[in-house]
Amino acid sequence: MKARYSVIVPMYNEEEVIQITYERLKKVMDECGDSYELVFVNDGSRDRTAEIMREISNRDEHVKLIDFSRNFGHQVAITAGMDYAEGQAVVVIDADLQDPPEVILQMIAKWKEGYEVVYAKRLKRHGETFFKKVTAKIFYRLLSSMTSVEIPTDTGDFRLIDRKVCDVLRGLKEKNRYVRGLVSWVGFRQTMVEYVREERFAGETKYPLKKMIRFALDGITSFSHKPLKIASYVGFFLSFSSFIYLFLVLFQKVFTSWTVPGWASIVGVNLLFNGIVLMLLGVIGEYIGRIYDESKDRPLYIVRETRGYPEAEAEDTRKASDYAR
């Protein structure tokens, strides 16, 4: 019998918390009273995360494991979980327990009312720095103002989606993925549940500043062309300003006795303009880089091993035998 509910848990170096995460998820899903599966996706962890999950999978038939050949990224791990999920309702939740598994029951209740997407909106964010809270707030509102797609603010990837939504998302093959934006883009009936985000149970955040910036760029460039339009507007403004400035210099030279005593101001203006031009080229480069990624058409991820999927395991065994020959 196929599971009615699938819970996708992307993991990267979560050995300190994964056992507790499994226990809390199992307790919550046992309470729902229907068949379920827990799909853990190991995104190339370098610690004992995959080993722990193999042991759990061996003793619990509800637990399934997808083990990547290397780290492909959080959003790709979520995508892989959707590719393998069998449930009529699919839940995505991180392994760090900042998003309480108990909220899943509220999501299921909303799903049974007829909603096809149920996302969790944060009322408070405990255990996060002032800088993280402020930058996250600015980003969500900036993204909302720049796109034509209504992406809910103060939400993450913690959400429930219906089977039909999952199937549509599986057909979207873009490489630089922003899953929460894609869920909003596909539409369907959506609602929310509110919750308080807790502190990370153990371990360290997997989104340092560098990854946060990259993630923000993926979100903006995937759903908005406005940065390119802004680049055009700024370029036009700089060209017009330069023409006016050149006209004033020629006017002073021909019709007045006053001339520029030095070139320091001109050098300063040139440096400013050159910096702006390079910045705009960087914006254009972001879009070109994404076009390049799409044109290569490489697979989103490579699976090294699966647990809990008999057909996939048989295929893995067959391939291993072929290699041995």
Image (cartoon, rainbow, N blue to C red):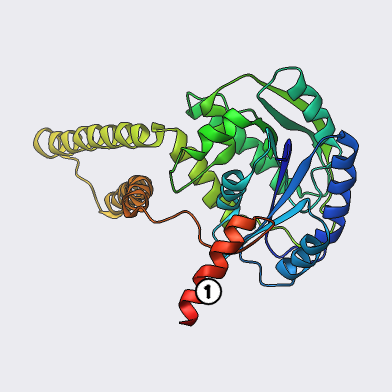
Total labels: the figure holds 1
Can see residue 141? no
The amino acid type found where label 1 is placed reads Ala
Q: Position of residue 16 (x, y in %)?
A: 82, 65
The residue that disc 1 covers is 320
Q: Quadrant of residue 165?
A: top right
Measuring 90% from the left and 37% from the top, which residue is drawn there? 31
Quadrant position of the N terminus in the picture: top right
Which residue is drawn at the image coordinates 78% and 29% (left, top)?
107
Where disc 1 sits, the SS reads: helix
> How busy is the neighbourhood of tag 1: few (under 14 within 10 Å), some, or many (20 plus)?
few
- Identified at 66% across, 72% down, the residue is 46
Picture coordinates of residue 154 (x, y %)?
Answer: 69, 33
Above or below residue 103? Residue 44 is: below
Quarter-of-image position of residue 142: top right
Q: In the image, 88: left or right of 247? A: right
Q: Is residue 5 left or right of residue 259?
A: right
